[in-house]
Amino acid sequence: METLLAITSIMFFPAGISLILGGMLYEWADRKLVARFQNRIGPRWFQPLADTIKLLSKEEIEPLGVNRALFFGLPVLALAGALTAALYVPIFGLRPAHSFSGDLIVTLYLLSLLTMCTGLAGWNSASRFSIVGATRTLTQLFAYEAPFLLALLGPAMAADSWQISRIVDYTQTHWMIVLQPVGFVIALIGLMGKLELPPFDAPEAETEIVAGALTEYSGRGLALFHIGKSVEMVVGVTLVTAFYLGGIGNPLFFLAKTLGLLLVMAFLQSVLVRLRIDQTVGMWWRAGAILALLQILALIVLK
Amino acid sequence: MNTEARLQRAKEILAPFTKETLTPESNRVDIVIDAADLTQATAALKAADWGYLSAITGLDLGPEAGSLEAIYHFCDAAAVTSLRVRLPREGQPEIASVADQVPVASFYERELSEMLGVIVVGTPDPTHLFLPDDWPEGVFPNRRDFKIEDAAPVERDVPKVPEQGRVGNKFIVPIGPQHPALKEPGHFEFAVDGEIITGARMRLGYVHRGIEKATEQRNWIQNLYLLERICGICSHTHTSAYAQGAEKLAQVEVPMRALAIRELVAGLERIHSHLLWLGVVAHEAGFDTLFMYSWRDRETVMNLLEELTGNRVNYSISVLGGVKQDIGPEQSKSIHKAMDYLEERIRYYLDVVTSDAMFLQRTRGIGTMTRDEAILYGALGPTARASGLERDVRVDAPYGAYGKFPVSLITDERGDLEAKFVVRLKELLVSCFTIRTIVDNLPAGELAVRFPRKVPAGETVSRVEAPRGEAFYFIKSEGGESPTRIKIRTPSLCNWTSVINKAVGHQLADMPMMISGMDPCFSCNDRMVTVRRKDDSQTMTWAQLRAYGIEKYKSR
């Protein structure tokens, strides 16, 4: 029974299939909202699913001069990383499937795995656009990663635990957005950087480098990366909502809060202009990192 | 200084080299010089700061006359000085390059040598600009005895981009002819060191249609519709420039009402073009919201054009001798209504591009071109005006109805991308104002007068300010039903030099915006040669194409 439950929790619910479908729904909500902000009609609700099915049924082209194992292995690893991260996070407002002391750090590194895989995949593709894109992806990772980590560390320090479920218990009663507003802004913008959403879409700026690191990917590989990204979106939005917007509470209420966060993100995506990679890095280190550090300092002093 | 004084001064400057002086038109002198004197004559004009090189026309006088002519047109406000160099048709027609003095001449010289077979000695890049790489040697399409059968493709070694794109530590990033950033077929190679550009090259001519050559086989009226199709954005510019030149040669006096309607449509076309540009550059910057909004508002002007002319793209309002459609009270009402909406939106965009902090990060101080550089590179149109260079044919040499309904000149001193936005958007406000004025004060009179079937022999230069810059037409007639030669220097070709020269040292991420910043038009640039091969199975006759179309439609 125990094993069956574990398998169910990994394959179907809350992780696995339902998480992937949830990711597509979030992706649709994001695309639809951005479209409405931009005065467009936007996709129908099943469009991300249709895209995925189409990609999965397409031929996968392997470019010359790539390391085969890496080329086909990286998309799987990226998706696996994102799905594993979901196990430690209260997805859809449910209790995390697994929990141990220090799982926050593990989750954050599992989330970065996707970015690392994207960068490596670009480097491995041996195409000019991919290499420039990979360089930008990894450069950007070093820009937002530290401030994002520090921003999530704020609630952890307040809750005196590095275990996600403990922190969530604490934030249930303490709205961190009020107590640590700076952290919330950095976490939200850091999440947009992690997801390479505008204005942090320089790594996949289509007008310069086609699709960036994933230019050479097609078919299944591309689909896996896309699914990984959608899952990462769910995990990221869930984490930020649970940490800063009053914990989990009622799952339905929690879902509404994540969608509210998505609305804010879609709005930011619509009104902001893409930053050049040097501007992205400059902004994170000149403002983001310093503000996050100041907040941590304030926390230590006030405690 | 008025036009006569300018022409007088040009004659004085060029006196030491002059072999023969012709005055074909009141605003133009045509000075015949020796090929050996060309560089010195150009230097003299340049030293005296007399105008800019607007175009080089290559003429073939035919095998009987046995000579070629290269005509260098310099423009200074309304005055035009043509330096005419006669060259032997047989053997080695050689001429010295002036590209070291006038960088933009490099493009015109490449065109001259590949189209007419003039050897330009010392031109910086003698490779093909327009013709395909597999074009046979010694076949020149603009010569009178050119036959399409001679143009069968040949095998030739063409320098290719290195397969892996690596040259030492540097990468060559190719952009185009197929690239998501470029919806149109041009090819650019940027050598990058990290994100910084260290070199740039370009190649055009992927969609040649041979329009210049085709004009020689059609009559005067047919050409109007052919030339309208040079560009899908400034189609009216081309019909205006052509009609204006043909009417001048035929000595037809066009009624003022027709000229005013032409100016009105030109104003609407400018709004359409600049709003399109605004969207494109916003998209290059990754600001898709502005892109969507400006293209939505552009629909207003497109619908208005459809209402006035019946067409959204090739308006086809001009005919030789006048215009086709009138503007009545109902149309003026819709024009005013559309202008109310557009003026409000344009003011809003002007506010966005000058105050949005993140957008300014991408435009302020990027690709700055000083006034001196703009003069050196021969920039024209809004690209030049954004660098404080006061060049606008509508103001300098008022043609058509621009004398009666003048426009004000917009310039900006800064020369960066932001200035280009400001100049273009302010020009739109001017256009809106002019359109309202014309609608309210439309002169009474006929719409069109009769245009003769045959046009008297002569040569004329016709210049029109397109949304992107100056369109230059050289039209030559020998008294027949079709023109002998039409040379078109399209509005954006002259601005490439500035972009290619300014690219080095900028970031790769800025390049799409910088290229779009000059509003490049590929249909502008590619229009010279019929690339139809004799063994090309895709060649269809009109009847075949029609049958194919009907078949395709039925089997849907």
Image (tube, rainbow, N blue to C red):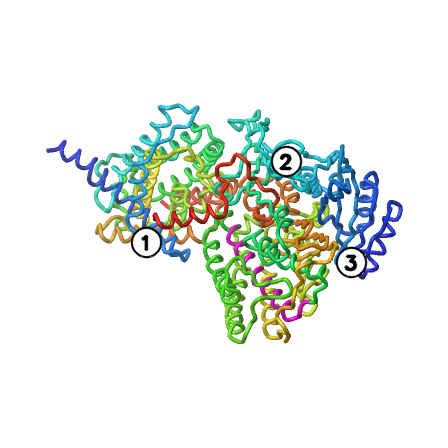
Q: Which residue is drawn at 83% across and 38% down?
A: B36
Quote the CA–CA distance across marks 2 and 3.
Answer: 34 Å
Disc 2 and disc 3 on one polypeptide chain: yes
**Chain containing mark 1:** A
The residue located at (50%, 39%) in the rendering is: B178
Three-letter amino acid code of the residue under disc 1: Gly
Q: Report the residue marked by disc 2.
A: B128
Q: Name the residue under label 1.
A: A260
Q: Along the polypeptide, which appears first: circle 2 or circle 3?
A: 3
Query: Residue B115 versus residue A209: which sits nearer the camera?
Result: B115
Magenta stretch: give its range. B254-280
What type is the residue that disc 2 sits on? His
Q: Which chain carries label 3?
A: B
Residue B467, how many percent across, how many down? 61, 56
Q: What residue type is labelled 3?
A: Glu
Residue A90 visible? The answer is: yes
Q: Is mark 1 on a helix, strand or loop?
A: helix
The label nearer to you, 1 versus 2, is: 2
Decide whether residue B297 is among the magenta residues. Answer: no
Q: Mark 2 falls on what kind of element?
A: loop
Q: Mark 3 points at which residue?
A: B25
**Distance Cα–Cα, label 1 vs label 3:** 70 Å
Estimate the x, y position of residue A286 in percent, counting from the top left.
50, 43
Q: Quadrant of residue A74?
A: top left
Image: B125 above or below B79: above
Q: How far apart are marks 1 and 2 (CA)?
A: 57 Å
Badge 1: residue crowd in 10 Å (few <14, some 14–19, many ≥20) = few
Q: Nearer the viewer, residue A261 or A248?
A: A261
Q: Give the dominant element type of the magenta stretch: helix, strand or loop.
A: helix
Return the chain for callout 2: B
* Coordinates of residue B436 in the picture (x, y in percent): 58, 71
Q: In this view, does B25 lie above or below B330?
A: above
